[in-house]
């Protein structure tokens, strides 16, 4: 999950405000689509929901940590509007 945040941050452009939005957006995945694809391809597999839920929880934890870290980084770097 963290590499996805890094990619979103690096490709977010020169505006720090864009980067703080694009990092979690790049890292997020839609669990409903993942569940639909997984159940269509593996209908007898019961562990699919648990794997998708685990991925969702980990993504949420990493995103919250990133968003908590961003104001500190912006304050150190002197970025306005953080």
Image (cartoon, rainbow, N blue to C red):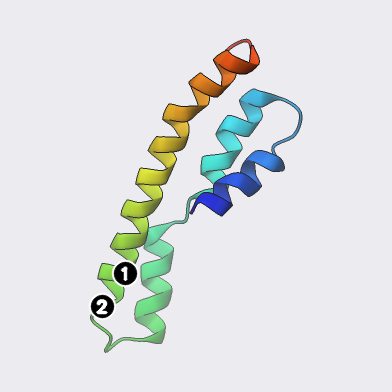
Q: Please say if 74 is above or below 30.
A: above
* Residue where numbered disc 1 is placed: 51
Relative side of 16 to 71, left or right: right
Q: Pointer 1 and pointer 2: residues touching (CB < 8 Å)?
A: yes
Instruction: Give x and y (percent) for residue 3.
Output: 57, 53
Q: Residues within 10 Å of mark 2 (few under 14, many from 20)?
A: few
* Residue where numbered disc 2 is placed: 47
Q: Quadrant of residue 73?
A: top right
Which residue is at 48% across, 50% downward? 28
CA separation, marks 1 and 2? 6 Å
Q: Nearer the viewer, residue 3 or 30?
A: 3
Relative side of 47 to 66, left or right: left
For label 1, the SS is: helix
Q: How many marks can you see?
A: 2
Tell me the quadrant of the picture where the C terminus can be found. Answer: top right
The residue positioned farthest toward the bottom in the image shown: 44
Which residue is at 62% across, 24% downward? 17
Number of the label disc, if any, that sits on residue 37? none
The residue positioned farthest toward the front in the image shown: 76
Which residue is at 40% across, 36% downward? 65
Relative side of 64 to 81, left or right: left
């Amino acid at each position: 999950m963290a590499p996805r945040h890094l990619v979103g941050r690096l490709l977010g452009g020169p505006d720090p405000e864009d980067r703080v939005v694009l990092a979690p957006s790049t890292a997020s995945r839609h669990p409903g689509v993942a569940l639909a694809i997984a159940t269509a391809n593996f209908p007898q597999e019961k562990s699919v929901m648990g794997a998708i839920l685990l991925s969702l929880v980990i993504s949420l934890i990493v995103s919250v940590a990133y968003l908590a870290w961003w104001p500190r980084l912006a304050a150190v770097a002197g970025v306005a509007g953080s």
